[in-house]
């Protein structure tokens, strides 16, 4: 059979550049000798010998796998290493596919190879132009599994790396302490193009912090690049920067060996993340989301961190949280009581910006767990995951001010001098707070009793501002969602709520607080469609305190006629 040459199709349907001479599954026979290409050190691909064991048919849906073994002394010592995914495998000087699968704790350097025919099919997929594809974990079986992708990380704390590793574990992406952030190395020329066997880095974070998923280039067809031989996130269409990279060393391990590498120069965009591999385009560039973090800690100079993270609905929030947590825990490492003021500014393209202030008490100091409760970071994910329209986040700015003191108080008791109050009066609630490490404090909070409550029983609630939620109508657009996310009570406050008997409605994203019964009946949901939702009114009063408050207390009162 003649050698096949798989062409890349252009957008007009005409054949594009070829990946070169290839060999088909039908031509492969057990016992054939060949070689692979990968970078063991530096930037230059080197050969390693392989021996064909068998072809495993239908290993994945509509995909065979070529089973090979290497007797190269470097791989006999280390085994198949993380970072070798995508290494091109040749038989009879023709490209057979990409090294992509292996066994954990394997004693022999045996690997599975994704046939090149399956990879080439991904080159011609049309682009939709969005990043809405969800992430899917790859199948983790007890046998042959995708070779793990090393995530070369620098600038993140060990705690942040561990938590990021937990988030990425389902995708066989393993964070490893890397060799530095992207940029040309002294004495070495910048390399901005790929070749078969060279190292490719998918940039998830860059700047003062770097996190890049590294693998190996399988083939180059014009400006298109095929790599990995298996998915990264299995996310389908994406738009994430890719760069060239240098390998510092191949670290041998009893568990899984891996390459230690650093990114070099931006070289294109990752466009497709599919079962048979990833596809990049060296002729494109894509922006990332800039994030600046300013940290003020007593006794230390103000620290500022500037990074960019991948722009993707399912990645941006996770990566931003890791960067913020790492920066904060590194600058404020004291494991002691801390009160954190966190201001988050999120700029969204063609939408109102969002500003959120969080006050957080952390008994064990600034940790990823304590910052994970911040409303600002949750709001970022809600914007990215909104169900109304794509949200293009232009930038995120976060200011952290850390005070090493326990500014927290629990609401322990709520009382009044009598069980009844007079309609139209302004009585005071007696609220008992229990500050940490201090005697109990009492605050008297006045509230108004409307005349309309005469003859009724009402509930009065006092709770932390951080756990209370202002009344708002369900949003009907991205703009309304952003406005609602900005409506929060300060955690350093008490929210006094008095339930009122009259009803209102939420109508087309707006609150209509009080309406006559006849109007309410006309607006209630019909059997055809929902036009409105009823709303039980609560009159709220905000009382500032000097503490981050926690807890909630309730009191039932009877209201009598005004004398």
Image: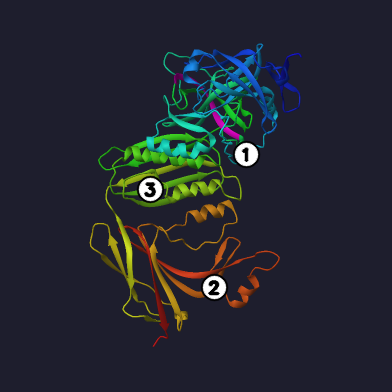
Q: Is residue 501 left or right of residue 238?
A: left
Ranked by sequence position, the earlier of labels 2 and 1 is 1
Check disc 2 and report its element: helix, strand or loop.
Answer: strand
Residue drawn where x is 33% and y is 64% of the image? 411
Mark 2 vs 1: CB contact within 8 A:
no
- Residue that extends furthest to the bottom in the rendered view of this protein: 563
Q: Is residue 245 magenta?
A: yes
Rendered image: mark on residue 130: 1
Residue 361 lies, in percent from the top left, at: 34, 52
Query: In the rendered image, which residue does mark 3 sit on?
Result: 370
Relative horizontal placement of residue 282, taking residue 459 as reference (left or right): right
Choose the circle earlier in sequence order: 3 or 2. Answer: 3
Q: Is residue 360 above or below residue 502?
A: above
Please provide percent x and percent y for residue 11.
72, 28
User: Magenta segment range?
Assistant: 238-251
Q: Main secondary structure of the magenta part?
A: strand
Q: Secondary structure beneath disc 3?
A: helix
């Amino acid at each position: 059979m003649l050698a096949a040459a798989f062409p890349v199709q252009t957008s007009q349907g005409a054949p594009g550049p070829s990946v070169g001479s290839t060999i088909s599954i039908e031509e492969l026979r057990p016992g054939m000798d060949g070689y692979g290409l990968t970078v063991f050190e530096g930037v230059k691909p080197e050969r390693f010998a392989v021996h064909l064991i068998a072809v495993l048919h239908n290993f994945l849906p509509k995909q065979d796998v070529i089973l090979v073994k290497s007797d190269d002394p470097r791989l006999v010592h280390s085994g198949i290493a993380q970072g070798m995914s995508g290494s091109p495998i040749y038989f009879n000087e023709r490209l057979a596919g990409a090294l992509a699968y292996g066994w954990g704790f394997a004693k022999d350097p045996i690997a599975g190879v994704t046939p090149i025919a399956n990879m080439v099919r991904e080159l011609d997929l049309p682009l939709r132009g969005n990043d809405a594809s969800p992430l899917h974990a790859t199948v983790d079986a007890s046998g042959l599994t995708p070779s793990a992708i090393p995530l070369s990380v620098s600038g993140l704390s060990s705690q942040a790396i561990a938590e990021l590793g937990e988030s990425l574990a389902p995708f066989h992406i393993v964070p490893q302490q890397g060799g530095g952030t992207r940029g040309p190395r002294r004495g070495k020329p910048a390399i901005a193009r790929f070749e078969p066997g060279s190292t490719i880095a998918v940039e998830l974070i860059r700047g003062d912090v770097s996190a890049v998923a590294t693998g190996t280039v399988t083939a180059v067809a014009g400006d298109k690049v095929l790599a990995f031989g298996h998915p990264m996130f299995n996310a389908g269409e994406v738009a994430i920067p890719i760069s060239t990279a240098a390998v510092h060393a191949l670290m041998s391990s009893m568990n899984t060996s891996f390459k230690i590498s650093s990114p070099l120069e931006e070289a294109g965009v990752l466009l497709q993340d599919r079962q048979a591999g990833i596809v990049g385009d060296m002729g494109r560039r894509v922006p990332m989301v800039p994030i600046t973090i300013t940290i003020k800690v007593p006794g230390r100079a103000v620290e500022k961190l500037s990074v960019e993270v991948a722009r993707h609905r399912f990645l941006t929030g996770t990566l931003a949280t890791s960067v913020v947590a790492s920066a904060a825990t590194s600058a404020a490492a004291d494991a002691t009581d801390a009160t954190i003021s966190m201001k988050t500014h999120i700029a969204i393209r063609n939408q109102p910006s969002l500003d959120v202030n969080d006050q957080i008490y952390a008994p064990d100091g600034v940790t990823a767990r304590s910052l994970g409760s911040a409303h600002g970071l949750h709001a970022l994910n809600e914007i990215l995951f909104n169900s109304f329209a794509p949200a293009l986040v232009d930038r995120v700015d976060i200011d952290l001010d850390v005070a090493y003191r326990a500014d927290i108080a629990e609401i322990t008791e709520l009382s009044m001098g009598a069980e009844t109050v007079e309609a139209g009066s302004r009585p005071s609630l007696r609220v008992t707070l229990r500050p940490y490490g201090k005697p109990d404090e009492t605050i008297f909070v006045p509230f108004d009793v409307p005349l309309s409550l005469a003859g009724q029983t009402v509930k009065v609630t006092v709770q932390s501002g951080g756990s209370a939620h202002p009344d708002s109508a369900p949003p009907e657009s991205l703009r309304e969602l952003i406005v609602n996310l900005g409506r929060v009570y300060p955690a350093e406050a008490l929210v006094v709520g008095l339930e009122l008997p009259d009803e209102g409605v939420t109508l087309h994203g707006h609150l209509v607080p009080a309406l006559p019964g006849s109007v309410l009946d006309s607006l209630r949901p019909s059997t055809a469609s929902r036009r409105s939702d009823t709303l039980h009114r609560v009159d709220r009063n905000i009382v500032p305190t000097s503490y981050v408050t926690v807890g909630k207390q309730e009191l039932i009162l009877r209201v009598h006629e005004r004398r």
